[in-house]
Amino acid sequence: MRRKYKEITDKQLINDILSKAEIIRLAMIDNGNPYLVAMNYAYIDGCLYMHSAKEGRKIDILSKNNKVAFQTDTGVELVLNKVDTV
């Protein structure tokens, strides 16, 4: 990580974040192209559990390359601004 001061290494904080978030975005590579899918998940005893069918694009991708990245958010809020139209 380039900005080490932003890296979260505290295991309790990581557990808190993963326990509170509801959506995970799973990133994979499909034939050299990025593929990102948002999913509900559960975080239990240090493990992530994601719902999936036994077949489909995710499974096809993961059978070729099981390296993934993921991202999730907590404490976010959508703020809408009224935009004047001309």
Image: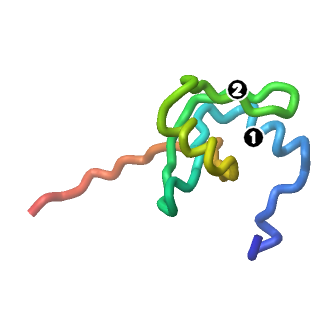
Identify the amino acid type marked 1: Ile
Element under label 2?
Answer: strand
Q: Residue furthest bottom?
A: 2
Q: Quadrant of residue 17?
A: top right
Q: Closest to the observer: 63 or 44?
A: 63
Q: Judge whether 12 appears above or below 27 on screen.
A: above
Q: Residue at x 65, y 42 (%)?
A: 74
Q: Residue at x 48, y 32 (%)?
A: 56
Q: Earlier in the sequence, mark 2 or mark 1?
A: 1
Q: Position of residue 47 (x, y in %)?
A: 81, 32
Quadrant where the image shows the C terminus: bottom left
Identify the amino acid type marked 2: Ala
Q: Total number of numbered labels?
A: 2
Q: Judge whether 29 appears above or below 50 on screen.
A: below
Q: Closest to the observer: 32 or 50?
A: 32
Q: Which mark is residue 17?
A: 1
Q: Closest to the observer: 39 or 75?
A: 39
Front disc: 2 or 1: 2
Q: CA distance from mark 2 to mark 1?
A: 12 Å
Query: In this image, 44 relative to 74: left or right?
Result: right
Q: Residue furthest front?
A: 64
Q: Position of residue 53 (x, y in %)?
A: 54, 23
Q: Position of residue 66 (x, y in %)?
A: 68, 47
Q: Which mark is residue 42?
A: 2
Element under label 1?
Answer: helix
Q: Position of residue 73 (x, y in %)?
A: 62, 45
Quadrant where the image shows the N terminus: bottom right
Q: Which mark is residue 60?
A: none
Query: In this image, 63 relative to 38: left or right?
Result: right
Q: Residue at x 33, y 52 (%)?
A: 81
Question: Mark 2 packing: few (<14 Cα in 10 Å), some, or many (20+)?
Answer: some
